[in-house]
Image (tube, rainbow, N blue to C red):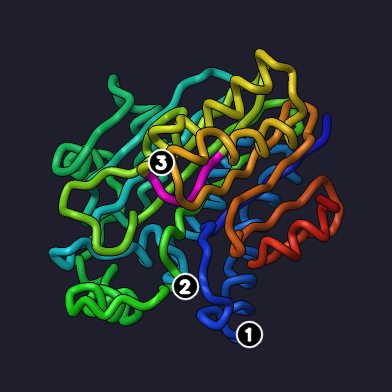
Amino acid sequence: MGKYVIIIHGGAVNTDPGTIPPEKEEQLKKGLHNALTAGWEILQRGGTALDAVEAAVMSLEDNELFNAGRGAMFNLNGEVETEASIIDGLTLRGGAVSGLKLVKNPVRLARLVMEKCKHTFLTAEGAQEFALAQGLTLQDPSYFKTEEQRQEWLDIIQEARAEHANKHDTVGAVALDQHGNVAAATSTGGIEGKLRGRVGDSCIFGGGALANNEVCAASCTGDGEIIMLASLAHEVYALRKYRKLSITKATRAAIEMYADKLQGDRGIIALDPAGNLAIDSNTNVMRCAYRVDEDAPFVTVWKAELDRHLKL
C-alpha cells in the first residue's frame, strides 16, 4: 500500500477581506475540515480515490456556506441550477450533469451517470429523470433557497451589488489512494445572477476537472467562462505530460495561461501519481484543505496563508 493524499477547494475569489469576518472564516474552515475528513477516512482505510472525492464533495454540497448543492447561487429567475462532474483516473471514465434544480447531491448523480448510464453527460429534466430512476434523493426547491442566497439574489435584482464573499464558490476534490489511483470531482451552483440555462466549467472535462493515473488529477474553481475557454484542467495535464513540468510548476503556468486575453479568477488543486500536490490561484481567497497520509491536515481560507504554508 502506498501514499494517500486528498485536496479539496471551496472556491477562489478576489474580495474585500471584510466580507469574511473571523466568525465566518471559522465556519468555512470547519466545513472544509469536515469535507476533508470525509474523504481522508476513506483513503486511510484503503478505499478508492473515486469514493473519497465523491464523499468530500458531497459534504460541501450539503453545507449551505458553499456554492454547490444546498448553498447554490440563484439564477436571475430566482432558481437553483447546479452542475457537477467526476472522473476516475484509472479507467478514464467519467460522469457529468448540469441544469439540476432538485438533486440534493449533484456529484452523486454524476457518479451514477458514469457507472449506470450509456452516456457521459446528462442535463436538466433528463438528468433528473435519471436521478429518479436511480432512487436518488430529490429535494423540494425550498431546500436550496437559503436566506443568504436569497438576499444575494435580491441584491442583484435590485442592482445593489456589493462584493459578495460567496461568489465563484465552486467546490472540488482530487485524491490519490493507496492503490496508486487518482480521481477528481467538481460541483457548483454557478455564478450569482446567471442567466437561466447557463452552464459553467464544473461539468466540463478538461475545463473544471480531469484525472489520469499516468499524469495527474486536477479540479478548478473561479470564473467558469474563462476556465472553459482556457481548458484549465487540461492545461495542467498537458504541461505535465508533454513539457514534463512538476505539478507545482504546471499548476502555476496554467493559472497564468492566456491571462491577458482571459481575465478573471482562477484556482486549481492538483496532484500527480507520486502524491506531490499543488494548490494555486490568482485570488486573495482560496478556500482549501489537504491531508497527506497521517500528517496533520491543513485548512485555510486565505491565499497568503496558503503561500506561507507551502513556502511559495
On the question of residue 50 being in view, the answer is: no
On the question of residue 128 being in view, the answer is: yes
**What residue is at 56 percent from the left and 27 percent from the top?**
235
Any magenta on residue 280? Answer: no
Say which label, 2 or 1, has the lower sequence index.
Answer: 1
Pick the front one: 220 or 95? 220
Q: Which numbered dot is residue 226?
A: 3
Number of residues whose C-alpha sits closer than 10 Å to that of mark 1, classed few (under 14), some (14–19) or many (20 or more): few
Asked if the residue under mark 1 is in contact with the one under mark 2, i.e. CB atoms within 8 Å, the reply is no
| Residue 237, percent from left and from top | 60, 24
Left or right: 211, with 303 as reference point: left
Residue range of the region highlighted in magenta in the rendering: 219-224
Number of residues whose C-alpha sits closer than 10 Å to that of mark 2, classed few (under 14), some (14–19) or many (20 or more): some
Left or right: 8, with 111 as reference point: right
Give the alpha-carbon distance from disc 2 to disc 3, as whole Å: 20 Å
Q: Where is mark 2, residue-wise?
A: 165
| Residue 144, percent from left and from top | 29, 68
Mark 3 against mark 1, which lies toward the viewer?
3
Number of residues whose C-alpha sits closer than 10 Å to that of mark 3, classed few (under 14), some (14–19) or many (20 or more): many
Q: Where is mark 1, residue-wise?
A: 22
Left or right: 51, with 272 as reference point: left
